Image (spheres, grey):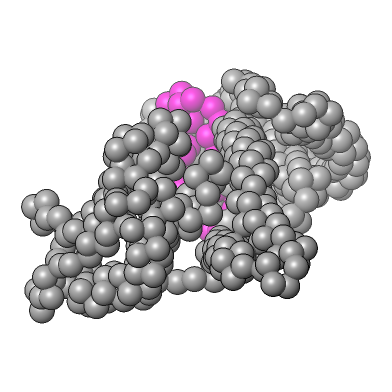
Amino acid sequence: MNSLFNRIVLSASIAVFVLFMGLWQWFSANHQYNQNQIQQSLHRELATHMAHINPLLSQGVTSDAALKEAFHDFMLLGPSFEIYTLDLQGKLIAFDAPKSVIKRQQVDIAPLQQFINGAKLPVLGQDPRSPTTEKIFSAANLVDPRGVKTGYLYVIIGGQEFDAWQAVVAQHQHLNQWGAGLSVTILFALALFVVLLKYFTAPISQLAHDMNQLSGHSLTQDSLLKTRPQASKEILGLTTNINQLLSQVHQQHLAIAKQQTERHDFMLHLSHDLKTPLTTLQGYIDTWLLLAEHERDASLIEVAARAGLQLQQLLNQMLQLEALENGQVTATMQHFALAPILDELRQYFLPRAKAQVVELAFEVDENVAIYSDPLLLFRVLSNLVDNAIRYTPNGGKISINVEYSGDRVGLLVSDNGSGIHKHELQALKQHTQVSTNTQQYQQLPQLGVGLSIVRQLLGLLNCNLQVQSTPGKGSHFKIELASPEINESISL
């Protein structure tokens, strides 16, 4: 019953059946009412005439013996009439029928008085031959020569014999009527079914037509279904939902296309970063091999070793970036002292800094504690310091300081290196805000693997990054740290 076809068939069948039965009952009741009204109206004066033309009734005589012969004459009217005389209380006095068929010895005289007083027809009275049936009748007062009312003449219109013959005829007629009614019902049901089917399925057909038209075209911003105001609210709601899905699919398609373009640019940039140390490594090793054994200089191997180390770092960064983008890294937030982290960071980069004559100023108060993931924060700072050392000239300085702004705490990583160009800085500012829905960042192909890792890690740590940079003067990276509530710091 879940199909639309079956529902329409069932609803149409029930509707037709209920309508047919209701109309049948209404027509039957209305027909019976009209028939009673006509019959009683035609015989309204029947009892009055009978009482007037019969000598005994005209004198008000109501005795059983005296009226038998009069009733016998009146029965010549046919079996459609049953004649009774009643006293003033409605008790039966005389009648021309076996006593065994009489089921009532007294009838209610209120309907008789209504009839005699000219009430609106039809008026139904009790049938002496049935304990429950009421029938139409004609009635008249019986008055003696002195003008005293002695009783009533009560004539039932449509007696038992009439009802019996009428039942036989009606049964035959009902069979014909039911056959005709069922035929009309079937035809009406089929017509109604076709109309309902066309009415209910027309909006669906239109919707399917619109969907077929969309399927033959590429998805664009204007690829939406037509909204038809005359459609039902369900179809309108379905159209709206489909249009919303189409818009979302279009936006996702644009995002995927943009991501593919950015990933392509990123891979080009990455291949350049990998190519540089690899070329250096291969070139210095080839040079060392071409020299005579006594001419080989250890400095060539040292340069090749540094190039190999740089290549190794890039490969490690690539693996880290892949793990971050695949969701394989999670943050474990906790309170911890900042000084040991910065001390470890300084020891890690000290050899490179000495080789390039770059000062590392990472000293902070030993009592300062922050809320973050120590391992992931170390990796963030490590990538920022690595970039800073790479672009800071000899005699430069790289510092890490704690800054407070109200109830918020941040880490400021500064250098006086070459800085970031305007277009790179603009790209970085556009992509360092954390997305509230996905907690992910867009690709940063022009900024290298290091900053791509930084923005992924900051997303996991729920931190914001503010960047200020001037080409030739240096850069400032401010990391706004998170807290269990908003952003805060504590002292140990």
Count of all numbered marks drawn on residues in the image? 0
**What percent of the width, then of the height, locates residue 269?**
62, 45
Residue 142: tell me if it is visible: no
> Above or below — where is 35 with respect to 11?
above
Give left or right: position of 258 versus 182. Answer: left
Q: Which residue is drawn at 68% across and 67% down?
A: 295
- Which image quarter holds the N terminus? bottom right
Q: Where is residue 242 in the image (x, y as percent from the top left)?
A: 64, 37
Q: Is residue 112 magenta?
A: yes
Which image quarter: residue 245?
top right
Closer to the camera in the image, 363 or 172: 363
Horizontal side of 73 relative to 107 (left or right) equals right
The residue located at (10%, 75%) in the rendering is 367
Compared with residue 59, is residue 7 higher up or lower down, i.e. above or below?
below
Q: Can residue 247 be seen in this view?
A: yes
Range shown magenta = 104-128
Image point (63%, 52%), residue name: 276
Residue 311 at x, y = what percent? 60, 63
Residue at the image position 38 percent from the left and 41 percent from the top: 418
Q: Does the magenta stretch include residue 340?
A: no
